[in-house]
Image: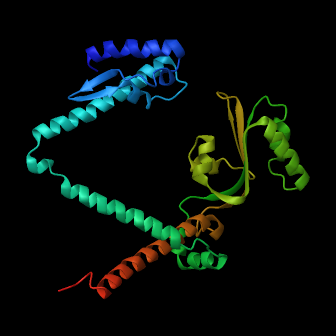
Amino acid sequence: MNIRITRYLAPLLLAAALSSCNMVSSLKHDDKVVAKAGRQKLYLSELNKYIPDGVSAEDSLNLAYRYINSWATEILYTKTAENELSKSQKDVTKELEEYRRTLLKYRFEQRYINQRLDTLITRQQLQKYYDDHKSGYVLQRPILKVRYVDIMKDSPNKGEILGLLSCTKGEELLVLDSLAYVSALRYFDKTGEWMDAGVLAREFGIDYATMMSQMHNGLIQQSSDASGDIKAMFVFDVQTDGIAPIEYCAASIRENILSERKRDLLAKLEQDLLTNALDHKEFVIY
């Protein structure tokens, strides 16, 4: 930043911050010039819009300097470009018009889709798409149904929680959920849905192959002397290869079906526009 600007700006910002510890509110209507780049001036009231409430005086000053540098850079770049580029290079009329058309087209397409897209996808439609595209759902990594807990080593409920991690009875699940809620650093029950082994491995800070190799009788457990906690996961079901079950693919299938419907809508829109224009002689092919 220009030294002269810095010397002028710092007292203004610091004085405001010291008087109220809120530069934005205290200087809201101040029209002092805080920076100048070329013929452009930045006023303090404009600067205040980019500094959030509640920040310290030091942070306010740092944010102000950062914004001023960014503001000045944009202006100086433009000024230099206007001086250095030829008249033809500075003519952006064509690019602006192309961008305008692209933006209008995009906005109209979004409105058109939002008004017409059928978002209801039945179980039968999911199943048909899955059956027709099974080759696209071959597992790249194992998937698992698990229950996971991260608990401090010295927790008084550690033993009971770890002992209940593999439970399936309703009353035991209630006890586990209650204990985990008050004692565990992290706990989740994904026994009813499939999870990617790579995602689960991140909970242990290891790769999924190492995690799978540590499984013994369905349990994967890891102790950390550094953090002082125990991470444990009980695996209720696992599939290591082959075609992923439809339940695991359902979200992806829904996205694909909706994407296809959007493409069909846009194709129909394009054809309707051409047909209508031809019928009304607004579009003529010679």
**Which image quarter holds the N terminus?**
top left
Tell me if residue 15 comes above or below residue 262 in the rendering: above
Tell me if residue 142 comes above or below residue 16 in the rendering: below
Instruction: Decide if residue 202 is on the left or right side of residue 18.
Output: right
| Closer to the camera in the image, 161 or 19 | 19
Asked whether residue 234 appears in the rendered view, the answer is: no
Count the labels in the image. 0
Quarter of image, res 83: top left
The residue depicted at 27 percent of the width and 85 percent of the height is 281
Tell me, what colour scheme is on the image?
rainbow
Task: List x then y, in percent, for residue 153.
Answer: 76, 31
Asked whether residue 13 appears in the rendered view, the answer is: yes
Tell me if residue 266 comes above or below residue 167 in the rendering: below
Quarter of image, res 12: top left
The residue depicted at 42 percent of the width and 74 percent of the height is 266
| Closer to the camera in the image, 207 or 276 | 276
Residue located farthest toward the right when viewing the structure as drawn: 171
The residue depicted at 42 percent of the width and 80 percent of the height is 268
Task: List x then y, in percent, for residue 124.
Answer: 64, 79
Task: List x then y, in percent, for residue 167.
Answer: 84, 52
**Which image quarter holds the C terminus?**
bottom left
Tell me if residue 32 comes above or below residue 206 in the rendering: above
| Closer to the camera in the image, 55 or 215 | 55
